[in-house]
Amino acid sequence: MLSKKTKYGIKALTYLAKTNKECPVQISEIAENENISVKFLERILLELRKAGVLDSKKGKGGGYFLARQPKDILMTDIIRTLEGPIAMVPCVSLNFYKKCDDCPDETVCAVNKLMIQVRDSSLAVFRNNSLEDLIRS
Amino acid sequence: MLSKKTKYGIKALTYLAKTNKECPVQISEIAENENISVKFLERILLELRKAGVLDSKKGKGGGYFLARQPKDILMTDIIRTLEGPIAMVPCVSLNFYKKCDDCPDETVCAVNKLMIQVRDSSLAVFRNNSLEDLIRS
DNA sequence: ACAAATCCTACTCACATTGTAGGAAACAAA
DNA sequence: TTTGTTTCCTACAATGTGAGTAGGATTTGT
Protein backbone atom coordinates (compact mmCIF):
# COMPACT_ATOMS: atom_id res chain seq x y z
CA MET A 1 0.00 0.00 0.00
CA LEU A 2 1.08 3.50 -0.80
CA SER A 3 0.99 5.59 2.37
CA LYS A 4 -1.21 8.66 2.49
CA LYS A 5 1.90 10.67 3.19
CA THR A 6 3.33 9.82 -0.20
CA LYS A 7 -0.01 10.19 -1.91
CA TYR A 8 -0.54 13.64 -0.42
CA GLY A 9 3.03 14.58 -1.21
CA ILE A 10 2.61 13.77 -4.88
CA LYS A 11 -0.67 15.65 -5.01
CA ALA A 12 0.84 18.70 -3.40
CA LEU A 13 3.77 18.68 -5.78
CA THR A 14 1.55 18.36 -8.82
CA TYR A 15 -0.57 21.20 -7.50
CA LEU A 16 2.51 23.38 -7.32
CA ALA A 17 3.65 22.30 -10.74
CA LYS A 18 0.25 22.96 -12.28
CA THR A 19 -0.47 26.36 -10.76
CA ASN A 20 3.04 27.44 -11.70
CA LYS A 21 2.93 30.72 -9.79
CA GLU A 22 5.73 33.19 -9.37
CA CYS A 23 5.07 33.67 -5.66
CA PRO A 24 5.25 30.98 -2.95
CA VAL A 25 2.09 28.99 -2.31
CA GLN A 26 0.84 28.53 1.24
CA ILE A 27 0.26 25.15 2.84
CA SER A 28 -3.34 26.04 3.60
CA GLU A 29 -4.10 26.73 -0.05
CA ILE A 30 -2.70 23.39 -1.18
CA ALA A 31 -4.41 21.54 1.65
CA GLU A 32 -7.78 23.03 0.83
CA ASN A 33 -7.57 22.34 -2.88
CA GLU A 34 -6.32 18.77 -2.47
CA ASN A 35 -8.43 17.82 0.57
CA ILE A 36 -5.54 17.23 2.93
CA SER A 37 -5.22 17.98 6.64
CA VAL A 38 -3.21 21.18 6.98
CA LYS A 39 -1.00 20.01 9.83
CA PHE A 40 -0.27 16.68 8.22
CA LEU A 41 0.63 18.33 4.93
CA GLU A 42 2.85 20.74 6.82
CA ARG A 43 5.05 17.86 7.91
CA ILE A 44 5.10 16.32 4.47
CA LEU A 45 6.20 19.49 2.73
CA LEU A 46 8.88 19.97 5.33
CA GLU A 47 10.32 16.57 4.49
CA LEU A 48 10.28 17.38 0.81
CA ARG A 49 12.08 20.63 1.47
CA LYS A 50 14.77 18.89 3.48
CA ALA A 51 15.17 16.46 0.62
CA GLY A 52 15.77 19.37 -1.73
CA VAL A 53 12.65 18.91 -3.80
CA LEU A 54 10.91 21.97 -2.43
CA ASP A 55 12.08 25.32 -1.21
CA SER A 56 10.26 27.65 1.13
CA LYS A 57 9.95 31.18 2.37
CA LYS A 58 8.88 32.06 5.88
CA GLY A 59 6.76 34.88 7.18
CA LYS A 60 4.08 36.94 5.50
CA GLY A 61 3.81 36.23 1.80
CA GLY A 62 5.78 33.07 2.36
CA GLY A 63 5.02 29.51 1.34
CA TYR A 64 6.38 26.66 -0.72
CA PHE A 65 7.63 26.41 -4.27
CA LEU A 66 9.44 23.82 -6.38
CA ALA A 67 13.20 23.81 -6.00
CA ARG A 68 13.68 22.71 -9.60
CA GLN A 69 11.73 22.57 -12.82
CA PRO A 70 9.01 19.90 -12.95
CA LYS A 71 10.88 17.98 -15.64
CA ASP A 72 13.87 17.67 -13.30
CA ILE A 73 11.92 16.22 -10.39
CA LEU A 74 11.77 12.46 -10.77
CA MET A 75 9.34 10.18 -8.99
CA THR A 76 12.23 8.15 -7.61
CA ASP A 77 13.23 11.13 -5.46
CA ILE A 78 9.74 11.65 -4.14
CA ILE A 79 9.02 7.99 -3.45
CA ARG A 80 12.34 7.39 -1.71
CA THR A 81 11.91 10.50 0.40
CA LEU A 82 8.36 9.92 1.54
CA GLU A 83 7.76 6.20 1.18
CA GLY A 84 11.24 4.84 1.76
CA PRO A 85 12.62 1.88 -0.19
CA ILE A 86 11.14 1.13 -3.59
CA ALA A 87 11.92 -2.56 -3.13
CA MET A 88 9.33 -4.67 -1.34
CA VAL A 89 11.95 -6.49 0.72
CA PRO A 90 15.10 -4.99 2.24
CA CYS A 91 17.30 -7.75 0.80
CA VAL A 92 16.78 -6.42 -2.75
CA SER A 93 16.84 -2.73 -1.94
CA LEU A 94 19.50 -0.66 -3.67
CA ASN A 95 19.41 2.27 -1.24
CA PHE A 96 18.23 0.57 1.95
CA TYR A 97 19.79 -2.90 1.74
CA LYS A 98 19.51 -5.21 4.72
CA LYS A 99 20.01 -8.96 4.93
CA CYS A 100 17.08 -11.16 5.88
CA ASP A 101 17.41 -12.92 9.23
CA ASP A 102 15.71 -16.11 8.14
CA CYS A 103 17.40 -16.50 4.78
CA PRO A 104 20.70 -18.42 4.71
CA ASP A 105 21.48 -17.78 1.05
CA GLU A 106 20.04 -14.94 -0.99
CA THR A 107 21.30 -16.33 -4.27
CA VAL A 108 18.94 -19.29 -4.09
CA CYS A 109 15.99 -17.50 -2.48
CA ALA A 110 12.84 -17.45 -4.56
CA VAL A 111 11.53 -14.34 -2.83
CA ASN A 112 14.76 -12.55 -3.59
CA LYS A 113 14.67 -13.61 -7.22
CA LEU A 114 11.09 -12.48 -7.70
CA MET A 115 11.41 -9.22 -5.86
CA ILE A 116 14.46 -8.13 -7.82
CA GLN A 117 12.30 -8.24 -10.92
CA VAL A 118 9.52 -6.29 -9.24
CA ARG A 119 11.97 -3.70 -7.99
CA ASP A 120 13.50 -3.22 -11.42
CA SER A 121 10.15 -2.83 -13.13
CA SER A 122 8.88 -0.34 -10.56
CA LEU A 123 12.12 1.56 -10.64
CA ALA A 124 11.83 1.88 -14.40
CA VAL A 125 8.42 3.46 -14.02
CA PHE A 126 9.50 5.89 -11.32
CA ARG A 127 12.62 6.88 -13.22
CA ASN A 128 10.60 7.39 -16.34
CA ASN A 129 8.13 9.80 -14.77
CA SER A 130 8.96 13.35 -13.86
CA LEU A 131 6.54 15.77 -12.27
CA GLU A 132 6.05 17.28 -15.70
CA ASP A 133 5.03 13.93 -17.16
CA LEU A 134 2.38 13.56 -14.50
CA ILE A 135 0.69 16.92 -14.97
CA ARG A 136 0.33 16.44 -18.70
CA SER A 137 -3.13 14.96 -19.10
CA MET B 1 6.70 -3.74 2.16
CA LEU B 2 6.02 -7.35 1.50
CA SER B 3 4.45 -8.92 4.58
CA LYS B 4 6.16 -11.82 6.27
CA LYS B 5 3.05 -13.82 5.64
CA THR B 6 3.52 -13.59 1.90
CA LYS B 7 7.23 -14.07 2.17
CA TYR B 8 6.80 -17.22 4.24
CA GLY B 9 4.07 -18.44 1.92
CA ILE B 10 6.30 -18.18 -1.12
CA LYS B 11 9.13 -19.91 0.70
CA ALA B 12 6.90 -22.75 1.79
CA LEU B 13 5.55 -23.21 -1.70
CA THR B 14 8.99 -23.29 -3.25
CA TYR B 15 10.05 -25.80 -0.62
CA LEU B 16 7.19 -28.06 -1.64
CA ALA B 17 7.96 -27.56 -5.32
CA LYS B 18 11.64 -28.31 -4.83
CA THR B 19 11.39 -31.41 -2.67
CA ASN B 20 8.74 -32.72 -5.04
CA LYS B 21 7.75 -35.65 -2.85
CA GLU B 22 4.99 -38.14 -3.52
CA CYS B 23 3.71 -38.04 0.05
CA PRO B 24 2.32 -34.98 1.87
CA VAL B 25 4.83 -32.79 3.69
CA GLN B 26 4.16 -31.76 7.28
CA ILE B 27 4.01 -28.14 8.39
CA SER B 28 6.74 -28.76 10.96
CA GLU B 29 9.17 -29.98 8.33
CA ILE B 30 8.64 -26.89 6.18
CA ALA B 31 8.80 -24.58 9.16
CA GLU B 32 12.07 -26.04 10.36
CA ASN B 33 13.76 -25.91 6.99
CA GLU B 34 12.63 -22.38 6.18
CA ASN B 35 12.98 -20.88 9.66
CA ILE B 36 9.32 -20.06 10.15
CA SER B 37 7.17 -20.26 13.28
CA VAL B 38 5.14 -23.47 13.04
CA LYS B 39 1.85 -21.98 14.20
CA PHE B 40 2.15 -18.95 11.96
CA LEU B 41 2.95 -21.10 8.96
CA GLU B 42 -0.02 -23.28 9.80
CA ARG B 43 -2.35 -20.36 9.21
CA ILE B 44 -0.61 -19.36 6.02
CA LEU B 45 -0.83 -22.81 4.47
CA LEU B 46 -4.46 -22.99 5.45
CA GLU B 47 -5.15 -19.82 3.48
CA LEU B 48 -3.34 -21.20 0.49
CA ARG B 49 -5.36 -24.37 0.67
CA LYS B 50 -8.60 -22.43 0.77
CA ALA B 51 -7.42 -20.50 -2.26
CA GLY B 52 -6.91 -23.78 -4.11
CA VAL B 53 -3.14 -23.52 -4.39
CA LEU B 54 -2.45 -26.27 -1.88
CA ASP B 55 -4.22 -29.43 -0.89
CA SER B 56 -3.90 -31.29 2.38
CA LYS B 57 -4.39 -34.57 4.14
CA LYS B 58 -5.21 -34.89 7.82
CA GLY B 59 -4.04 -37.38 10.41
CA LYS B 60 -0.98 -39.57 10.58
CA GLY B 61 1.10 -39.39 7.43
CA GLY B 62 -0.81 -36.28 6.47
CA GLY B 63 0.46 -32.88 5.45
CA TYR B 64 0.41 -30.43 2.58
CA PHE B 65 1.10 -30.78 -1.12
CA LEU B 66 0.70 -28.62 -4.23
CA ALA B 67 -2.73 -28.73 -5.78
CA ARG B 68 -1.32 -28.21 -9.27
CA GLN B 69 1.98 -28.49 -11.06
CA PRO B 70 4.51 -25.75 -10.24
CA LYS B 71 4.32 -24.36 -13.76
CA ASP B 72 0.57 -23.81 -13.31
CA ILE B 73 0.88 -21.85 -10.08
CA LEU B 74 1.38 -18.20 -10.91
CA MET B 75 2.69 -15.59 -8.54
CA THR B 76 -0.41 -13.47 -9.14
CA ASP B 77 -2.48 -16.12 -7.34
CA ILE B 78 -0.14 -16.27 -4.38
CA ILE B 79 0.28 -12.52 -4.00
CA ARG B 80 -3.42 -11.79 -4.30
CA THR B 81 -4.24 -14.51 -1.78
CA LEU B 82 -1.70 -13.62 0.87
CA GLU B 83 -0.88 -9.97 0.26
CA GLY B 84 -4.11 -8.69 -1.20
CA PRO B 85 -4.21 -6.14 -4.02
CA ILE B 86 -1.20 -5.87 -6.31
CA ALA B 87 -1.93 -2.20 -6.90
CA MET B 88 -0.49 0.29 -4.42
CA VAL B 89 -3.70 2.30 -4.29
CA PRO B 90 -7.26 0.93 -4.32
CA CYS B 91 -8.32 3.32 -7.10
CA VAL B 92 -6.15 1.48 -9.63
CA SER B 93 -6.77 -2.05 -8.38
CA LEU B 94 -8.29 -4.47 -10.85
CA ASN B 95 -9.55 -6.97 -8.28
CA PHE B 96 -10.07 -4.73 -5.24
CA TYR B 97 -11.16 -1.42 -6.75
CA LYS B 98 -12.31 1.37 -4.44
CA LYS B 99 -12.69 5.05 -5.12
CA CYS B 100 -10.52 7.50 -3.19
CA ASP B 101 -12.39 9.75 -0.78
CA ASP B 102 -10.21 12.77 -1.35
CA CYS B 103 -10.01 12.59 -5.12
CA PRO B 104 -12.75 14.32 -7.12
CA ASP B 105 -11.62 13.09 -10.54
CA GLU B 106 -9.48 10.03 -11.12
CA THR B 107 -8.87 10.83 -14.75
CA VAL B 108 -6.80 13.90 -13.90
CA CYS B 109 -5.12 12.50 -10.78
CA ALA B 110 -1.35 12.24 -10.96
CA VAL B 111 -1.21 9.49 -8.35
CA ASN B 112 -3.71 7.47 -10.32
CA LYS B 113 -1.78 7.95 -13.54
CA LEU B 114 1.50 6.91 -11.98
CA MET B 115 0.16 3.97 -10.05
CA ILE B 116 -1.55 2.46 -13.07
CA GLN B 117 1.88 2.17 -14.64
CA VAL B 118 3.36 0.63 -11.52
CA ARG B 119 0.49 -1.83 -11.25
CA ASP B 120 0.88 -2.92 -14.86
CA SER B 121 4.60 -3.44 -14.59
CA SER B 122 4.32 -5.41 -11.36
CA LEU B 123 1.47 -7.45 -12.73
CA ALA B 124 3.58 -8.35 -15.74
CA VAL B 125 6.29 -9.71 -13.45
CA PHE B 126 3.89 -11.73 -11.31
CA ARG B 127 2.10 -13.13 -14.32
CA ASN B 128 5.38 -14.03 -15.90
CA ASN B 129 6.64 -16.04 -12.94
CA SER B 130 5.31 -19.44 -12.01
CA LEU B 131 6.51 -21.48 -9.09
CA GLU B 132 8.57 -23.50 -11.53
CA ASP B 133 10.32 -20.37 -12.78
CA LEU B 134 11.32 -19.47 -9.25
CA ILE B 135 12.86 -22.80 -8.30
CA ARG B 136 15.05 -22.91 -11.38
CA SER B 137 18.30 -21.38 -10.21
C1' DA C 1 5.04 45.87 17.43
C1' DC C 2 2.13 42.78 15.04
C1' DA C 3 0.44 39.39 12.06
C1' DA C 4 1.34 35.71 8.97
C1' DA C 5 3.67 32.14 7.62
C1' DT C 6 7.00 28.09 8.13
C1' DC C 7 9.54 25.15 11.44
C1' DC C 8 9.85 21.53 14.87
C1' DT C 9 8.84 18.10 18.50
C1' DA C 10 6.03 15.36 21.02
C1' DC C 11 1.91 13.14 21.62
C1' DT C 12 -2.45 10.30 20.80
C1' DC C 13 -5.36 7.03 18.56
C1' DA C 14 -6.61 3.36 15.57
C1' DC C 15 -5.40 -0.45 13.04
C1' DA C 16 -2.66 -4.17 10.93
C1' DT C 17 0.96 -7.42 11.45
C1' DT C 18 3.03 -11.04 13.79
C1' DG C 19 2.86 -14.50 16.67
C1' DT C 20 0.71 -17.62 20.53
C1' DA C 21 -2.71 -20.74 22.99
C1' DG C 22 -5.72 -24.22 23.09
C1' DG C 23 -8.64 -27.19 21.62
C1' DA C 24 -11.77 -29.69 17.81
C1' DA C 25 -11.85 -32.77 13.99
C1' DA C 26 -10.00 -36.29 10.96
C1' DC C 27 -7.25 -40.12 10.07
C1' DA C 28 -4.02 -44.25 10.47
C1' DA C 29 -2.31 -47.86 12.97
C1' DA C 30 -2.11 -50.81 16.83
C1' DT D 1 -11.71 -49.00 19.88
C1' DT D 2 -8.03 -46.58 21.66
C1' DT D 3 -4.09 -43.81 20.85
C1' DG D 4 -1.13 -40.72 18.62
C1' DT D 5 -0.50 -37.66 14.81
C1' DT D 6 -1.77 -34.40 11.94
C1' DT D 7 -4.57 -30.50 10.04
C1' DC D 8 -8.35 -27.23 11.21
C1' DC D 9 -10.21 -23.17 13.49
C1' DT D 10 -10.92 -19.29 16.65
C1' DA D 11 -9.62 -16.17 19.92
C1' DC D 12 -6.21 -13.58 22.05
C1' DA D 13 -1.80 -10.73 23.00
C1' DA D 14 2.04 -7.94 21.82
C1' DT D 15 4.13 -4.94 18.94
C1' DG D 16 4.80 -1.54 15.56
C1' DT D 17 3.36 1.83 12.14
C1' DG D 18 0.41 5.16 9.95
C1' DA D 19 -2.36 9.15 10.36
C1' DG D 20 -3.43 12.96 12.44
C1' DT D 21 -3.29 16.63 16.44
C1' DA D 22 -1.37 20.12 19.73
C1' DG D 23 1.32 23.70 20.79
C1' DG D 24 4.70 26.56 20.56
C1' DA D 25 9.34 28.59 18.39
C1' DT D 26 11.14 31.06 14.65
C1' DT D 27 11.31 34.06 10.73
C1' DT D 28 9.70 37.84 7.93
C1' DG D 29 7.00 41.67 5.81
C1' DT D 30 4.30 45.80 6.92
Image (cartoon, coloured by chain):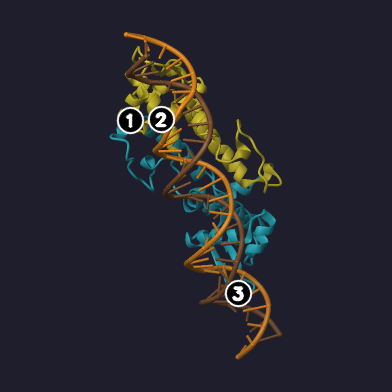
Chain colours: A yellow, B cyan, C brown, D orange
Secondary element under disc 3, as helix, strand or loop, is loop
Going from the N terminus, do you reach mark 1 or mark 2 first?
A: 1
Q: Are marks 3 and 1 on the same chain?
A: no
Q: Which residue is mark 2?
A: A41
Q: Which residue is mark 1?
A: A34
Is disc 3 surrounded by few (<14), some (14 to 19) or many (20+) residues within 10 Å?
few
The residue positioned 48% from the left and 53% from the top of the image is: B81
Disc 2 sits on a residue from what chain?
Answer: A
Is disc 1 surrounded by few (<14), some (14 to 19) or many (20+) residues within 10 Å?
some
Q: Amino acid at mark 2?
A: Leu
Secondary element under disc 1, as helix, strand or loop, is helix
Secondary element under disc 2, as helix, strand or loop, is helix
Of A67 and B121, the residue lying toward us: A67
Asked whether, in this view, residue A28 is left or right of residue A125, the answer is left
Of B70 and B14, the residue lying toward us: B14
Asked whether, in this view, residue A33 is left or right of residue A64, the answer is left
Q: Which mark is residue A70?
A: none
Q: Which residue is mark 3?
A: B59
Disc 1 and disc 2 in contact, CB within 8 angstroms = yes
The residue positioned 49% from the left and 45% from the top of the image is: B127
Quadrant for residue B91, please give it: top left
Q: Amino acid at mark 3?
A: Gly
Residue B11, given in percent of the width and then of the height, sits at 61, 52
Taking D12 as reference, is A119 above or below it?
Answer: above
Disc 3 sits on a residue from what chain?
Answer: B
- Distance, label 3 to label 2, CA atoms, is 56 Å
